[in-house]
Image (cartoon, coloured by chain):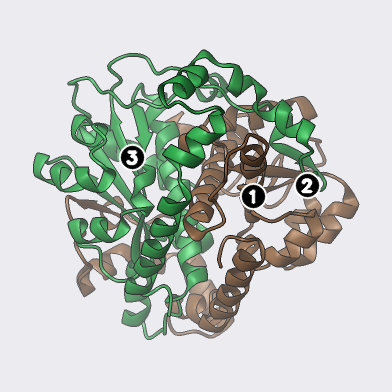
Chain colours: A green, B brown
Amino acid sequence: MLEILKNRGTVRNYSEKEVDETLLNNLLEASFQASTTGNMQLYSVVVTRDQAGKERLSPLHFNQPQIINAPVVLTFCADFNRFSLWCEQRNAVPGYANFQSFMTAAIDAIIVAQTFCVAAESKGLGICYMGTTTYTAAGIIDALNLPKLVVPVTTLTVGYPKVPPAHSDRLPLGSVIHYEKYQDYTPEAIDIAFSYKESLEESKRYMEINKKETLAQIFTDIRYTKANNETFSTAFMEVLKKQGFLS
Amino acid sequence: MLEILKNRGTVRNYSEKEVDETLLNNLLEASFQASTTGNMQLYSVVVTRDQAGKERLSPLHFNQPQIINAPVVLTFCADFNRFSLWCEQRNAVPGYANFQSFMTAAIDAIIVAQTFCVAAESKGLGICYMGTTTYTAAGIIDALNLPKLVVPVTTLTVGYPKVPPAHSDRLPLGSVIHYEKYQDYTPEAIDIAFSYKESLEESKRYMEINKKETLAQIFTDIRYTKANNETFSTAFMEVLKKQGFLS
């Protein structure tokens, strides 16, 4: 099991092979057994297999090809709608139209998404997370008809890998773990954390192609810019308001 | 693998057996190979083993006994501090002091936490999530010395189970999965979703003990009340401001 976890990698390119419905349900069922706050299961999963559905979602994921290419797209939503409807139907007054309840449901949804990934990978499937989900949540809400108290928090593309996934580098263990208290990073500790990543040929190639003097500038100036992050922050706050999680 | 996922359950009561340091690092290393946004690894894990550390954390988790009882407590934090320090040290201007960046890092942290759970359970360990983490994040930040751009999002207690974990009920698969579009729940669909849970002897016992006429009232009136959720919402928003993720 640990070997599967350690040798995994993201898969963006899928073979023609379909993902059998029984297998998909089996994987989802296994992932729904993961921990969930107060056993409330504050999530819903929207399964997209139809071409039309994928085409609606594709621009919302910035036309990254894996949405169209994957046989299955799963949108994981924080969902306090179902639970609140139950409360109302049982003479109980739900109090979940607030930010803490959104966080609770979002955590539930991510726990399920990641359990699904592990389950899927153990069966030879490959997955890719779409971080774009929280950037364009308003559009996804429209595309999937999500009611109030439902917010998409992540999306997975799922299918059989066309080629085996590449293993990708990680920070040294000691740069991520703290004992008893958080030890803030000295300049030397930062060098130790990032030097391997910076030494990779791939990193050097990105710097050359993009004419950047450091790898960090690729992130700040191109991939995850302040301007984009601020725009997406405002948009996501608006979504939380519109869906009823923020007053 | 699917059988392990399907038959798991939360473990709140741990045996005396220690969790070996090599095993713990091995499990963490495996979980750090999970997907992470742009391979930025926007998380840190604080390991608490010392009695004094557990005693500091215990009231922040409402004195639930598993904090003191477990050999290991892991606090998973959304962390944009390490990455931002690297950017600054490499002549790049980080733009991560915003809400979207918090969401990104929180998702990264939860993905790692859940991968750790699966890894741990595959080795015979048991875990319990502490949902209290986002309720009392301000206190946890003080207890663990978390700097700006670091916010605790969940906590796991980890150890060998004293007794095998009980399997707990889940909603019917069809009540959680939607095909192509979200189908909002009719009153009948709500009955179908919750009737099994309501029929359990355990549910009936809770209602009797708490003198409530429906199971839903246990949640709204006792376990997850509107007043608490609103108090914790305000507190968590304050934490996001104080840690630099909200202006």
Instruction: Give how far across and how far down residue B210 sits, in percent.
Output: 57, 82
Residue at (54, 42) in percent of width and height = B114
Q: CA distance from mark 3 to mark 2?
A: 32 Å
| Disc 1 to disc 2: CB gap under 8 Å | yes
Observer able to see residue A41: no
Callout 1 and callout 2 share a chain: no
Decide which of B95, A126 is in the foreground and name it.
B95
Q: Position of residue A144 (x, y in %)?
A: 20, 56
Q: Under tag 1, what secondary structure?
A: strand
Question: How many other residues sit within 10 Å of disc 3, few (<14), some (14-19) or many (≥20)?
Answer: many
Q: Residue at coordinates 71% horizontally, 33% vertically from top-left?
A: A190
Give the distance between the C-alpha atoms of the residues marked 1 and 2, in whole angstroms: 10 Å
Label of residue A182 in the image = 2
| Label pair 3/1, CB-CB below 8 angstroms | no
Q: Secondary structure at mark 2?
A: loop
Q: Amino acid at mark 1?
A: Cys
Chain holding disc 3:
A
The residue at 85%/53% (across/down) is B53
Q: Disc 3 to disc 1, how far (Cα)?
A: 23 Å
